[in-house]
Every structure is written in C-alpha cells, then in structure tokens.
Amino acid sequence: MKPRFPHDDICLLRDERGITLVEVLVSAAVMVVLITSIYIGIMYAQRETLQNYRHRAATLIAAGELERQYHYSINHVIQIPPQFDLFQGKPIDLVPLDNRRMLEARLSVESRMVPIVEHNISYEVYELRSIVEWTDPESRKPMRVVLHEDFYKR
C-alpha cells in the first residue's frame, strides 16, 4: 500500500483523485431536495399564518359584537325578556388585502331560548350567537367563526 502523502515528494496533490461527476450530481440532487422541502415548508407556514390571522380577526369581531349586544340589552330600557339588536348578513371589513382592498365578511347575530339543567333545576337562558362568514381568497373555501354567549333571564 502506497502512503497517501509521501515525505520525499514535493508535490503532495499528485496522487489525489478529486471528485467524480457522479458525486457532484448526487450532491446537487440532495441539495435540490433539501432546498425544495425548505421552500415548501416556508410557503405552507406563510399560508397557515395568514389563515390564522384572518380567523383571529373574525374571532375578535364576533367577540366584540357579543359584548356590544350585552351592553345594548343592559343600557336600554329594562325589558323582560331582554332585547338584542339582531341582524343577518351585515357586511364588514375583516382584514386588509393587497392594493388597498379589504377582505369582506358577513356578520350575523342570532338569539334563541335554550333550557339548561343543573342540580335537577331547569333554567332557560338566551343563547346569543355571533357569526362571521367569509370566503378565503386563496382557496375559495367558505370560512366561518361562531361564538356563543348565554344570558340568563332577569
């Protein structure tokens, strides 16, 4: 066996073979796969972050509407049963899109009587539902956020 770096030879790289073309192609293919997987992961994360932002904005709008309905029922003339400002399909701006456009959504508020039984005692409460609906701009799928709040009879 010949030593890799002979001590008596001045040129140390004479017996070095270098890299073959196959090794270069395999390395390039591995790099392409890695870069592609990282790119797909980043694009998926960006899409999910944007979708979560829209859902969070819709949840905040629905929660704010439930709070407004609560104050509407309390601060007006005391009415039994309590009165709410119910409506269907009110257009709202959800989040900004590109080029000064807004993502439009529909806000609805519904009310119904729901019986609740606790410790063998039956209560009737008003269930108030705040619903925000929109169409996702990228996937064209209908999206919906529904929040519930219970109001006891006075």
Image (cartoon, grey):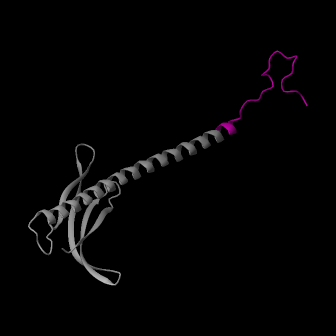
Relative to 114, residue 103 above or below: above
Is 73 placed left or right of 49 in the picture? Answer: left
Front residue (pair 61, 32): 61
Identity of the residue drawn at 41% across and 48% down: 46
Q: Quadrant of residue 67?
A: bottom left
Q: Residue furthest left?
A: 77
Check residue 47 for magenta coloring: no
Identity of the residue drawn at 73% across and 30% down: 18
Is 125 placed left or right of 24 in the picture? Answer: left
Is 78 placed left or right of 31 in the picture? Answer: left
Relative to 144, residue 13 above or below: above
Is 55 placed left or right of 153 in the picture? Answer: right
Q: Quadrant of the C terminus?
A: bottom left
Q: Which residues are magenta?
A: 1-24
Dominant secondary structure (helix, strand or loop) of the stretch shown in magenta: loop
Q: Quadrant of the N terminus?
A: top right
Q: Residue furthest top?
A: 10
Q: Residue furthest bottom?
A: 120
Residue 9: image location, x then y, percent: 85, 17
Q: Quadrant of residue 55?
A: bottom left
Front residue (pair 80, 3): 80
Residue 96: image location, x then y, percent: 26, 47
Residue 143: image location, x then y, percent: 31, 62
Relative to 41, residue 140 above or below: below
Front residue (pair 110, 49): 110
